Structures are given as C-alpha cells and as structure tokens.
Amino acid sequence: MEDLVIRDADVVDGSGAPSYRADVVVDGGRIVAVVKEAAAAGCQRPRATRELDAEGLVLSPGFIDMHAHSDLALLRDPDHSAKAAQGVTLEVLGQDGLSYAPVDDRTLAEVRRAIAGWNGPGDDVDFDWRSVGGYLDRLDRGVAVNAAYLIPQGTVRALAVGWEDRAATPAELDRMRRLVAEGMEQGAVGMSSGLTYTPGMYAGDAELTELCRVVASYDGYYCPHHRSYGAGALEAYEEMVALSREAGCSLHLAHATMNFGVNRGRAPELLSLLDRALADGADITLDTYPYTPGCTTLAAMLPSWANEGGPDAVLARLADDETSERIRHHLESIGSDGCHGVPIEWDTIEISGVADPALADLVGRTLEESARLRGETPWTTARRLLLADRLAPSILQHVGHEENVRAIMRHRVHTGGSDGILRGSKPHPRAYGTFPHYLGHYVRELGVLSLEECVAHLTGRPAARLRLPDRGLVREGYRADLVLFDPETVAAGSTFEEPRRLPTGIPYVLIDGRFVMEDGRRTGELAGRSVRRAPRRP
C-alpha cells in the first residue's frame, strides 16, 4: 500500500487548465497516481496507509516564493510558519545582490552589517560556510521549506573589488567571473543584483553583461533589482532587457513595480515594453507582491556616494555635520538614487523595525510624525536613528499604486514573490500573507485572476523559470510538494496593524510527501532541503 491517498480533492494542477476532481496518491515523497473522478467510478479506488478526505478543498502544487529574504530565518527558526503556513514549499534566496555566500571572513562581516535591516545581525547563526555550496549544504541538514539560491552580484563585487565606486580591473572582473561560475557549478539557479544598493550599484552594464554571460552558459537566469522603480523606471527596465539580451541570458525582473507619483497608471507602458521584447524572442519573467507599499532599509534611501566604502564609512559621513547636510540636500531636493531619483517624502517612510529596543517607540510611525512629536526636522530624526541603530532600521515605503499592482499581476509572465522581510516588530504583512492574499483577495473577492490562473502564477510558471523538471505541477512522478486550501475561506491573516498573524483556510501543506502543516498547525517536520539545478556545463 502507498503512504497516502488524498481523496476527492478539487485539483488545480498548476498548468492553468480547468480544475478536476481526483484522488491523488503519494508514496516515497512523490505523486504516484492521479485518479480522476470519472476513472475512479469504474474501478476500485486507490488505497493507502493513510487516507485524507479533501472534500471541499483545492489541491494544488506547493507555492514557490520567487523573491524571499529568509536566508538566515530558515537557519534560526525551525518553525518558519511565516512561509509554511502560507503553503510555500520553495523559496528563492540570495536576492537583491546581497547575501552570505560566496564570502571570506572580511566580506561576511561587512555583508552582515549591510543587510542587518533585512535579516538581523545574525548573532544567533553559526556561519560555518563561505561558499555557495557550503551554504546549500547547510540547508541540507534540514529546514522548514525547500530553498534555491541566486548568486548575489553585490556580494561577489564586495569580495573581488570592495565597496568603492569604481570600475573593476581586468583581474577583478576575471575573479568575479570565476566566483559566479563556481556558484553555478555548486547549484545556484542564477544571479541577482541590487542596483540601488551598494556595492552592486557601482557595476556598469559592461561588467554586468560579462557576469550574465557566465550565468547564461550554465542555463541560469539573471534577477535584477534594477536601477530605479521611480524616476526613470521604464528606462531602467529597458536597460535590463537590453543587457540580458546582449548577454544571451534569461531575465527575471524582481518585484516588478511602478512606484511613486511619477508612475501612477503607467504599468501598461511597462507591459508593452515586455510584450515587444517577448515577441522578439526574449526570455523574460517577473514577480510581484500583492500590496502597494514597499519594504527595505532606511539606509538604502541614502545617495550612493554616501554609501561608498561600506557601513563604517556611511556612519562616519552621517556623524559629520557638513556631509550630513549634503546628504539631506540630495534626499530632499535633488532626489537620491537610493530613493529611485525621487525627492524623499518623509510621510511615506514608516519605521518597521529597529535592532535597539530603546528605539522601539519609533516603530509604526512615519518619520514625519516622529519628527513632529520631537519638534525637529524629519532628516534630524532619520539621521539620529541611523546613527543610534547602526544602519539597522527597516522601513515600509508607501509609494505604490493599486492599478499598477493589478495590471502587472495579470501578465502572462507574472509569478508571485513575497519580498518578505521577517525581522522587526512591525514587518510588512506580505512576509506572512502574500500567497493567501492572492487567493483570497485578488481571486475570490476581486476576480482579478481566476483560481486556475493564479495557481499557475504561483506554482507551474515559477517552476518552469527555475528549470525544475519535477515540481510545480500535480503530475505522476512529480515531487509531492502540495497544498490543500479552502477556496471559500483562504485569506491572509496578516495586516499592517497585526503583520504576524497567520493565514486562514490552508489546513494542509506537504513537502516531499511529509506534512509540514496539518489541521492548520505546524508539525515538527523539517522536510526542506536545498534545490539545486544541475547546470548545463559551458
């Protein structure tokens, strides 16, 4: 007898095809039979050691979070209900050009400080790896959900060049090529960039093209957080499309939004750009989260020249009155490249997390509000906070537009990504709610997508981008990474007021045929492992 039969499920199989009723049989971590209702009526129904009655529930492939920031959370938090409870069975890590491999001791210390606002300082993590393969091996000891990894171009540049704003020398570029090749050989699925974050933003297009050529030779993809989501956003998208085509590399656009007042209602222009490139043979996909505010670190708002040299240099500039005034002028009058070329609006910047508990009274307030309560300017409050919290504060940035969010999620190359930052006392609710919010709000309540379309966006399409031959669909022989949810009640529990509430209507989640969520509760299973794409050798 097989391990499990899920009986009388409404199967939405991840392909976009209409749903059907079936019994799905799981054994040895894989789907071994899908017996549709019509076939089951004429023969003996499958039996197994365990039978699960799925009457009234939808059975789909596990959701794939194409943009996750769980690089350390997976290691420090065996429960990881933030993602497991959403039905996420695979996360793609190493995003936005900054993560923890490949590194040496110096670079690791610098990166830990630079992205403490995303992941915390990591004092509770044993950093017993330095290579991409070593990090993936660490995941293979057992984590809550599966994870794939993108080589972070900014970390590679920090390792080979440093944090200076200059072109790489030929020898440094050769070393970066070797580092990217080694990461791909060790199992990475592609390369990410954070082109509004230092030091990745200091790379010119020629340098990025050379690294993308290496990625393409291993059949990987390039995932840029490009140079602007505000002023010049369309030009920044055009730059990435042209660069990836020059390199012959597949392109996946990270959190593909059109934000700030300058881009209200302009999503159709982005989609037209993508449609023209797709019609001309380009291989492009994108991901979005189904919310309007963004989320990053407060330090990321600073102009690139202020971030040059790494965290210690930034703190020194902030402490110097003359340089601090120059930073303020760039932020408020010129439009910092860190703030996407748009003069900062302090009433859109909400503090979502701090490292120092003594600063917790600022969390949940905009910088404009906190400044008003203190009788000082917003920049004075922001500067004081950055210095006191050693660049660690995270923020919500309320600059998105609902019409753009809906238009982009309808596109045929769209996939789902949470961009979820899990630290902070008031994180963005997308970290805990992205996938049920798609299913509950945008499918059931608004009808922006059909259920079959939406599930394909969250499962089959991202699996195809990742070149995974046995995930993302409900098919015989595929891995039993599965979600059972109630289409009438599935919803994000998380809100901006209570961002850590878990979703409703997702009672069962399986990874490798093992229940990681059962009756709506997290089990003790650590069924997740690294997902490494066997590269096509150059």
Image (spheres, rainbow, N blue to C red):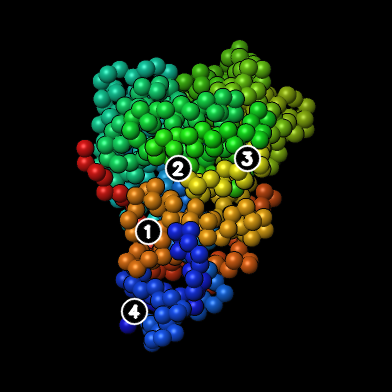
Label 1 vs 2, first from the N-terminus: 2
Numbered mark located on residue 404 in the image: 3
* Position in image of residue 80 (x %, y %): 49, 57
Whether residue 251 can be seen here: no
| 10 Å crowding of disc 2: few (<14), some (14-19), many (20+) | many
Q: Which mark is residue 203?
A: none
Residue 490 appears anywhere in the view: yes
* Mark 3 surroundings: few (<14), some (14-19) or many (≥20) residues within 10 A: many
Looking at numbered disc 1 in the image, what kind of residue is underneath it?
Answer: Arg
Dot 2 falls on a residue whose secondary structure is strand
CA gap, disc 3 and disc 1: 30 Å
Say which label, 3 or 1, has the lower sequence index. 3
Q: Are dots 3 and 2 in contact, CB under 8 Å?
A: no
Q: CA distance from mark 3 to mark 2?
A: 17 Å
Q: CA distance from mark 3 to mark 4?
A: 47 Å
Mark 4 vs mark 2: in front: 2
Q: Position of residue 394 (x, y in %)?
A: 58, 38
Q: Nearer the viewer, mark 1 or mark 4?
A: 1
Residue 471's tag is 1
**Residue 182, horizontal then vertical, whole percent:** 25, 38
Give whichever of discs 1 and 4 has the lower sequence position. 4
Of the pair 312 and 7, the residue shown nearer to us = 7
Which is more foreground, mark 3 or mark 4?
3
Label 3 or label 1, whichever lies nearer to me, is 3
Which residue position is annotated with label 4?
2
Tell whether 112 sits left or right of 232: left
Residue pictured at 34% horizontal, 49% vertical: 467
> In which quarter of the view is residue 447 placed?
bottom right
